Amino acid sequence: MNTVPTTEERTWAVIAHLSAIAFGMGILLPIIGWSEQRRKSNYASFQCLQALGYQSLGFTIWVLSYLVVIILASMILLIMLGSRGENSENMDTVAALGMVIIFVVVFGFLAIYLLLPIIAAVSCALGRDFRYPILGNRLGRYLAYDPVSNSEEQTWLLEDHEFRWVAAMGHLSILILLWGMLAPLTALLLQGKHSLFLKFQSMQTLIYQAAVTVLYFGAVFVYMFGIFLLVAGMGIAENLQTGSSEVIPGFIIFIIASFITIAILLLIPLLHVIGQYAGYRVLKGDDYHYPLVGRLVEQWMSKQVNSGEENLL
């Protein structure tokens, strides 16, 4: 078995890894590469699936770590400012130091996130078997990927685990606002016909993420609508030179819109957690169903299958 990657294999691997620097917009490229190279090249398929994992699972871990570090840095800064509040010179020094630390953390984490896929792309361009820290070796075992096999008979990656990995990464991509829907959509279009499991998971994931995205932008619209009515009411009151009573209806609507927006924005993180949990369940081997959405998609697919059987008869 030839273990030296061809130019085509290395090209797909490089494209898949470099797509991470597009911040979510490139998440479809690893799936396209995997779909194109599966049953052609274990090397390219593995690298594409690994790049997909970095952009979905890795992005999730990166965002959570980002938030934890920022919160801890902010808490430490507030404590230091509180303990030295009476000395203005010390307070200014501490504040400046805290801003430097936060700046380094923000851009340092961003640099690390972008540096890893660039290193991966360079390594694959040289034909090496790159592995992301922690993720790469675990995924290799999960897919039964053996780059140094000397067997004369070609042994492909575990198909069931390939489909599960792609489906799970579709669930986990929910944290990538808007662009995360490209993962389940691409998987559905390219490989849905080869796996009913992947088709179902991708379809319900796409609908679920679309609903969450609409909910998010709906919250923004409600809030902006409330501001518009408030400003419009203030303008009408000023032009008519009337009392503040003209502003009250707009102000009340603005307050209501603000409460609705806050309620939705508090709900969205819970929906994100459900998406993360769905990805975990799929990786563990479960056929996860989202509440309501999963049942509706399953019923639709059953009707499609039944109608197809009737047509054959």
Image: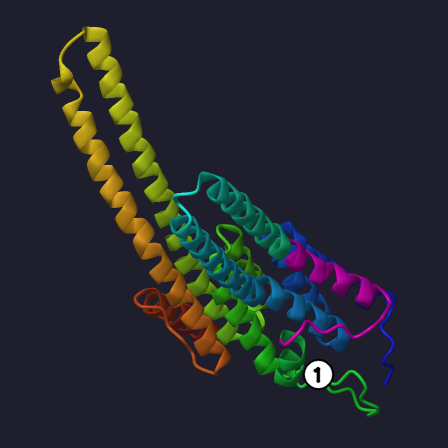
Q: Residue at x 55, y 48 (%)?
A: 97
Along the horizontal axis of the image, is 238 left or right of 287? left
Q: Residue at x 23, y 8 (%)?
A: 239
Amino acid type assigned to the residue bearing label 1 in the image: Tyr
Closer-to-camera residue (215/109): 109
Give the quarter of the image for residue 310: bottom left
Along the horizontal axis of the image, is 170 left or right of 292? right
Q: Which residue is mark 1?
A: 145
In the rendered image, residue 125 lying in the magenta stretch gets the answer yes
User: Where in the figure is residue 73, as x and y percent of width and height?
Assistant: 49, 56
Q: Which image quarter is the N terminus in?
A: bottom right
User: Where in the figure is residue 129, as x and y percent of width and height?
Assistant: 78, 75
Closer-to-camera residue (103/118): 103
Q: Residue at x 39, y 43 (%)?
A: 86
Whether residue 110 can be seen here? yes
Query: What segment carries the magenta color?
Result: 111-134
Q: Which image quarter is the C terminus in?
A: bottom left
User: Where in the figure is residue 109, as x and y percent of width and height?
Assistant: 61, 57
Whether residue 41 can be seen here? no
Up-down relation of residue 44 to residue 185 (above or below): below
Up-down relation of residue 197 to residue 270 (above or below): below
User: Where in the figure is residue 222, as x and y percent of width and height?
Assistant: 30, 38
Up-down relation of residue 43 to residue 234 (above or below): below
Q: Residues within 10 Å of mark 1 (few under 14, many from 20)?
A: some
Give the quarter of the image for residue 240: top left
Along the horizontal axis of the image, is 242 left or right of 138? left
